[in-house]
Image: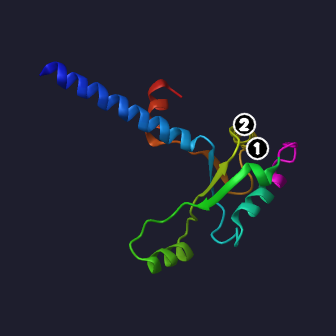
Amino acid sequence: MAQQSALHETQFTDIQWKKEDFENRQCRNKLRILGIQEGAEGQEPRAFIVKIFRAAFPDLVGWDWEKEVQRVYRFPLYLKKQQMAEEATVNHPHPRAIIVYFGNSLLRKAVFEKACLIQKLTARVLLFLLALISVIAQWKDVGV
């Protein structure tokens, strides 16, 4: 009975590790941008972000921004009613984060490194790597 319990615990730990690894792979090519006002991106958020990146990082030449920036969306609000969600986005003092999904992790890394060097794109606009809370907790454990 003890062997079977230990086997189940090992299998559970293995499955949990695989799940976290899969979630981390999904987040690997994403950046989170904070501080861009709601509605500033208009109807084409992808084109808006490409325009910002081209202006902010002119030395990153040789990249096809339209191809590499695959998806851009606002972080959703999880409210029960759609009307409440719409009111919250209009009246909320802090705009929702914009998530940018890159097709190439090298470009995402280059953008993030350049953003760290200049600290901010514009006033109160920050870039963050999208990482899971469990990964951040592991980084804190090892002193990162």
Near-viewer residue (96 or 12): 12
The furthest residue to the left: 1
Identify the element where label 2 is drawn.
Answer: helix
- Crowding at dot 1, Cα within 10 Å, few <14 / some 14-19 / many 20+, comes out as few
Q: Amino acid at mark 1?
A: Ile
> What residue sits 61% from the left and 61% below the top?
73
Near-viewer residue (55 or 104): 104
Image vertical order of residue 63 relative to residue 11, above or below: below
Image vertical order of residue 28 relative to residue 121, above or below: above
Residue 55 located within the stretch drawn in magenta = yes
Give the CA distance from mark 1 to mark 2. Answer: 19 Å
Mark 1 and 2 residues: CB-CB less than 8 Å, in contact? no
Which is more foreground, mark 1 or mark 2? 2
Going by the image, does 42 lie left or right of 87? Answer: right
Determine which of the numbered discs, if any, sits on residue 106 in the image.
2
Residue 36 located within the stretch drawn in magenta = no
Please provide percent x and percent y for residue 60: 84, 43
- Give the residue pinned by disc 1: 118
